[in-house]
Image (cartoon, rainbow, N blue to C red):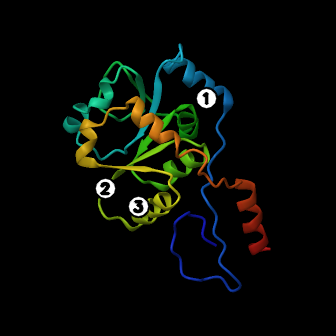
Amino acid sequence: MCLLSGCRELSWGSKENKTFGFFARTPQKDAVRRIRAALNPDGHKTIVFSGLGMTIDVGELASWKIWDSQNCASIVSSNTKVDKLNIYKIPYDDTGSQNYIAASDLVISKPRWETVAEAVSLHKPLILVTRTNMQEDINTIEYLQKHKRCELVDWQDMNQLQITGEILEKMKAQIGQDQEENSEEVVNEIRLIIE
């Protein structure tokens, strides 16, 4: 059984291999409404979830143009050492990333499976920042590109990225490409195997 979309596992199963698409935790509707109301009370901004991880050069990150986009509110992790007017830091003790992704209009992330799974499962447009040649990243990117479900930006180009109307229109084309998986279906398949 391959739980990761885009994985390339050998045929380990005694009968068959079963592959599932992306699946993720269900967001809490009240938390999502609270986040959207806090970041975008008048509904005129694009909320961008920036899941870029902890190993980032802070000096380089602080100079990115996206942070100064007046039409955007950016959600970042609590450890991000950039303070700008349009940045909202997820509280350190809040582990519900699915709520922040659900509240977002766009997700920018490294191709980490958990963030990608939440973005795809929640039907969010996705920009992936390419990084070193990690096999997991390569498989995830290839799968998403095959299904027209992401745009790629090189790390070196991130400092120039701005969210424009043109980019948002391009991103909307991704939605509808999702192959939704029900977490309950995955659990039931696992139960069948272990019983």
> Crowding near pointer 3: few (<14 within 10 Å), some, many (20+)?
some
Tell me the quarter of the picture where residue 157 sits: top left
**Which label belongs to residue 131?**
2
The location of residue 2, given as percent across then percent down, is: 60, 70
Do the numbered discs 2 and 3 sit on residues whose CB atoms are within 8 Å?
yes
Q: Is residue 28 left or right of residue 113?
A: right
- Kindly identify which residue carries mark 3: 137
- Kindly identify which residue carries mark 1: 32
Query: Which residue shows up at 33% across the image and 34% down it?
Result: 80
Tell me the quarter of the picture where residue 31 sits: top right
Quick one: SS at disc 3? helix
> Crowding near pointer 2: few (<14 within 10 Å), some, many (20+)?
some
- First in sequence: mark 1 or mark 3? 1
- Structural distance between the alpha carbons of marks 1 and 2: 30 Å
Q: Is residue 111 left or right of residue 119?
A: left
Q: Is residue 12 left or right of residue 109?
A: right
Task: Give the amino acid type for the residue marked by disc 3 in the picture.
Answer: Asp
- First in sequence: mark 1 or mark 2? 1
In this view of the protein, can residue 4 be seen by the observer? yes
Query: Which residue shows up at 53% across the image and 13% down it?
Result: 42
Query: Which residue shows up at 68% across the image and 86% down it?
Result: 14
Task: Give the amino acid type for the residue marked by disc 1 in the picture.
Answer: Val
